[in-house]
């Protein structure tokens, strides 16, 4: 009895000084793949569209990009099955407009490989604990702009124009129009046999060719791009010959 009383007293003392687990923080935004088992996301303002289960995202000021590991995160999809690319007219949403089809981190990896995914993320520190897809009432409109890009990694570039720099992601959907003779040439290598009168590339190439070409230069290079603000998607890149 004496030993039990001592053990109980010790447990009470330890409990009094126990540090509670940190509460999870949540954020909305477009998730991008960022290395094995990781995603990046710039937090955005999210609002529910009245009378629907759709969300609307808007840029927020003063926020920093998050890089989160998701190897053990719960993942809820808006599709009715984990391996679907599209909703196919049927959605799985809870009362808060969050995806409720229970899927795995490997399913999230497959989804992120296709491009940005609008999500709500719960995380502690640098680790995501729960990720739910959301449906948007509408995606942001693409824009075109001229500026410079510099490679960050095989799927990410920094685009600078008008004194501002944004991070953009490429996917298998990104097209690359070259001035060079071959898709695999170095940046602006050789004669501009595929440059139009405006100096823009005309030869259709792929996002992998873009990555390969950017690896041949260490400095930012001049381009024209088509991109989607908000989601950070790089849709199309034109190589530019000279200062045209």
Image (cartoon, grey):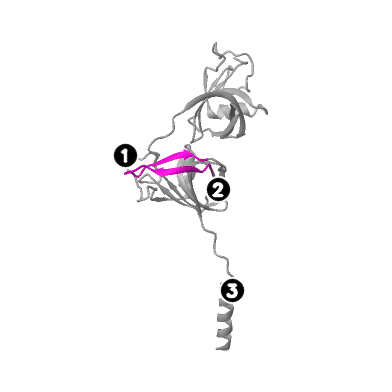
What residue is disc 1 on?
Answer: 89
Of the pair 93 and 113, the residue shown nearer to us = 93
Between the C-alphas of marks 3 and 2, the distance is: 32 Å
Q: Secondary structure at mark 3?
A: helix
Q: Which mark is first along the chain, 2 or 3?
A: 3
Q: Secondary structure at mark 2?
A: strand
User: In the shown orientation, is residue 119 left or right of residue 223?
Assistant: left
What residue is disc 2 on?
Answer: 68
Of the pair 189 and 224, the residue shown nearer to us = 224
Q: Nearer the viewer, mark 3 or mark 1?
A: 3
Q: Which residues are magenta?
A: 40-60
Between the C-alphas of marks 1 and 2, the distance is: 31 Å
- Residue drawn at x 54%, y 33% is 168
Q: In the rendered image, which quarter contains the C terminus?
A: top right
Instruction: Verify whether residue 43 appears in magenta.
Output: yes
What residue is disc 3 on?
Answer: 14
Residue 110 seen from this side:
no
**Circles 3 and 1: CB distance less than 8 Å?**
no
Residue ranking furthest to the right: 218
Q: Position of residue 208 (x, y in %)?
A: 55, 30
Q: Nearer the viewer, mark 3 or mark 2?
A: 3
Crowd tier of the residue under label 3, counting other residues whose Cα lies within 10 Å: few below 14, some 14–19, many 20 or above: few
Q: Which mark is first along the chain, 1 or 3?
A: 3
Q: Is residue 127 above or below residue 200?
A: below
Of the pair 232 and 76, the residue shown nearer to us = 232
Q: Position of residue 162 (x, y in %)?
A: 58, 26
Q: Which mark is first along the chain, 2 or 1?
A: 2
Q: Secondary structure at mark 1?
A: loop
Q: Position of residue 139 (x, y in %)?
A: 42, 34
- Residue drawn at x 57%, y 81% is 9
Q: In the rendered image, which quarter contains the N terminus?
A: bottom right
């Amino acid at each position: 009895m004496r030993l039990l009383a001592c053990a109980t007293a010790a447990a009470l003392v330890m409990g009094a000084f126990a540090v509670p687990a940190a509460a999870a923080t949540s954020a909305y935004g477009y998730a991008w793949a960022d290395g094995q088992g990781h995603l990046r996301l710039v937090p955005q303002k999210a609002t529910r569209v009245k009378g629907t289960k759709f969300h609307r995202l808007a840029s927020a000021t003063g926020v920093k990009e998050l890089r989160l590991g998701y190897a053990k995160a719960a993942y809820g999809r808006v599709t009715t099955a984990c391996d679907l690319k599209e909703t196919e007219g049927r959605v799985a949403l809870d009362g808060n407009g969050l995806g409720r089809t229970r899927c795995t981190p490997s399913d999230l990896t497959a989804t992120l490989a296709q491009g940005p995914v609008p999500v709500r993320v719960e995380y502690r520190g640098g680790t995501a604990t729960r990720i739910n897809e959301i449906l948007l009432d509408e995606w942001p409109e693409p824009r075109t702009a001229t500026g410079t890009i510099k490679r960050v990694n095989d799927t990410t570039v920094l685009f600078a124009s008008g004194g501002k720099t944004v991070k953009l992601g490429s996917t298998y959907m990104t097209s690359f129009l070259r001035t060079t003779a071959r898709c695999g040439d170095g940046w602006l290598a050789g004669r501009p046999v595929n440059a139009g009168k405006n100096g823009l590339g005309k030869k259709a190439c792929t996002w992998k060719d873009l990555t390969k070409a950017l690896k041949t230069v260490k400095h930012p290079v001049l381009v024209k791009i088509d991109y989607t603000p908000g989601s950070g998607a790089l849709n199309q890149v034109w190589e530019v010959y000279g200062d045209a």
